[in-house]
Amino acid sequence: MADPQTATCPQCSRIIAPEDTIVFRHGILGHLDCRRPRVLSAEERTLAFLYCQDHEVAECSTCTRRFRLRELVSQDQFGVRLHACPWCHTDLTDTIRAHLYACTMLPAEVRRRAQAARDAARSLVKRSLELRDAADVAMREAEAAIQSLRETLRKVPTRIASKDPGRQLGLLSYHVLPIHLQIGDRFSDESGEWEVASRPSSTAGGKSIHTRVRRVDQPATIDRTWIACERIHVRAPRRSLSA
């Protein structure tokens, strides 16, 4: 029997595989990075940074060497983050991801939600061409699973807190849809650094997202509107690890 029809990325026109890392909105799926369809998501990179910095996360089958995360991070000519073997340049993204979802250093709840988000995204790809109602359900499930993981990541990591109760956790970086902004999230543009001051709400039939923001150096707030499918690079609010 032939394989069922699958979705294609509107940017590169290639088939989206269930293992690819995707973005989605309004029923449209696409690759997060068309050049590297299986690149780590922002949430996966955050997990690796928080919990796996101090131990080996990848093994190169070609060089038979094992590496820590900091030994693999580099950038290509487009400024895209790579996770390649420094000796033979083999892409080690898949082996990092396999380590991440099995790593015992992740708290059980974090690992469970990360796996749920990954499973929901795979299911969305597989079900994306079903009847519209079924596809919409899959998309809502995926959005809920990813949002649940992001909310968990915004909490203080217990393993890091136990090392140094007095230190602070830096601003974690995310790419989020405007509807997922939270009060205290920060972002930058050509006019400076801004902080989200109110919960987002949708307007114009869900095509636009509205919220109040303020410059971090000024108390006054102003209106800010984004296209609903526009992704925003934000940093979560700084939290004390002793809290």
Image (cartoon, rainbow, N blue to C red):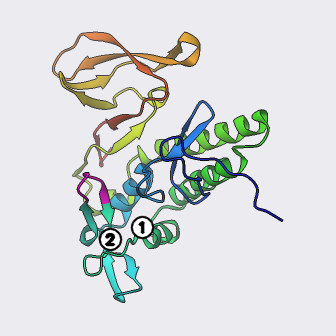
Seen from the viewer's position, the closer of residues 7 and 175 is: 7
| Left or right position of 2 against 101 | right
Q: Write the residue at 25% across / 24% down.
A: 194
Where residue 206 sits in the image (x, y, percent)? 56, 18
Question: Magenta includes 98?
Answer: no
Q: Write the residue at 25% across / 72% down.
A: 71
* Residue at the spot of label 2: 84
Q: Quadrant of residue 65?
A: bottom left
Residue 157: mark: none
| Left or right position of 138 against 97 | right
Where residue 22 sits in the image (x, y, percent)? 52, 48
For label 1, the crowd category at 10 Å Cα-Cα, with few meaning under 14, some 14 to 19 and many 20 or more, is many
Please tell me whether residue 23 is drawn above or below residue 17 in the rendered image: above
Range covered by the magenta-colored residues: 76-81
Q: Quadrant of residue 72?
A: bottom left
* Residue at the spot of label 1: 93
Question: Magenta includes 79?
Answer: yes
Mark earlier in primary sequence (2, 1): 2
Secondary structure beneath dot 2 equals loop
Name the chief secondary structure element in magenta: loop
For label 2, the crowd category at 10 Å Cα-Cα, with few meaning under 14, some 14 to 19 and many 20 or more, is some
Quadrant for the C terminus in the image: top left
Quadrant for the N terminus in the image: bottom right
| Left or right position of 111 against 136 | left
Where residue 188 sits in the image (x, y, percent)? 24, 30
